[in-house]
Amino acid sequence: MEPVKQIRSKTVVMPNVDIDTDQIIPARFLTTTTKVGLGKQLFFDWRYAPDGSDKPEFVLNRPENRGAAILVGGHNFGCGSSREHAPWALLDFGIRVVVSTEIADIFRSNSLKNGLVPVIVDKESHAWLLANPGIEATVDVASATLTAGGKRIPFPIDKFTRYCLLNGVDQLGYLREHEADIARYEAAHA
């Protein structure tokens, strides 16, 4: 995973409540174990008409939202099953940050292990972000803040998670960074 320090982008707003992982990427697309190409299936049932053409009214199909890396979702984003394909699809599409008032625990964990930043904000800030689609925003992992429209919105992130994101490592990568220390400890306590 690449280090994630700061993400600057306009926001795209998807205010739906309880967006679950099957809506993010339907189960019929979970036949792959690679992360590449899943962006095509992101929100498939919402993005495409039965003939496979884009639904022009869907928020991610609108020209003004192309290239947005910060998705402001409704309350309880990423609920449902534990599929890791959901963050993979978002990342493959170009989404780097998901903002909500609540993000499902398993989705949040899977996101962090893959470099997708889940940002939980208070209800007032969330309502403001929903009301201002397309605003330029910056998510700074080191300071754990989202800045937009002159507002500086803090979000919770634990020290270990912040370290992993800033250094581009997951839990296993973190352990591998300390192999020499682990070996010394094991040798001393054998």
Image: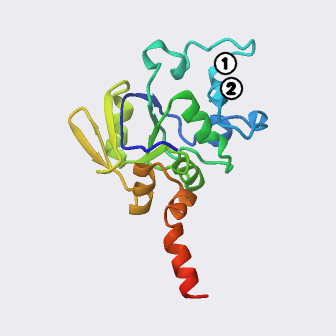
Total numbered badges shown on the rendered structure = 2
Viewer-proximal residue among 7 and 25: 7
**In the image, residue 94 lies at what x, y percent?**
51, 29
Viewer-proximal residue among 138 and 114: 114
Residue 172 found in image quarter: bottom right
**In the image, residue 113 lies at what x, y percent?**
55, 51
Q: Which numbered marker is on residue 48?
A: 1
Write the residue at 54% across / 59% down: 171
Mark 2: few, some, or many residues within 10 Å (few <14, many ≥20)? some
The quarter in which the C terminus is drawn is bottom right
| Residue type highlighted by circle 2 | Asp
Element at badge 1? loop
The reply to whether discs 2 and 1 touch (Cβ–Cβ < 8 Å) is: yes
Q: Is residue 19 left or right of residue 144?
A: right
- On the question of residue 188 being in view, the answer is yes
Q: Is residue 96 left or right of residue 152?
A: right
Q: Residue furthest left?
A: 150
Q: What colouring method underlies this structural image? A: rainbow
| Residue type highlighted by circle 1 | Tyr
Q: Disc 2 and disc 1: Cα gap in Å?
A: 6 Å
**In the image, residue 173 lies at what x, y percent?**
54, 57
- On the question of residue 128 being in view, the answer is no
Above or below 184: residue 104: above
**In the image, residue 34 lies at what x, y percent?**
70, 38
Viewer-proximal residue among 158 and 19: 158
Element at badge 2? helix
Write the residue at 32% across / 50% down: 142
Write the residue at 32% across / 33% down: 137
Q: Is residue 184 left or right of residue 22?
A: left
Write the residue at 54% across / 86% down: 188
Residue 68 found in image quarter: top left
On the image, numbered disc 2 is attached to which residue? 45
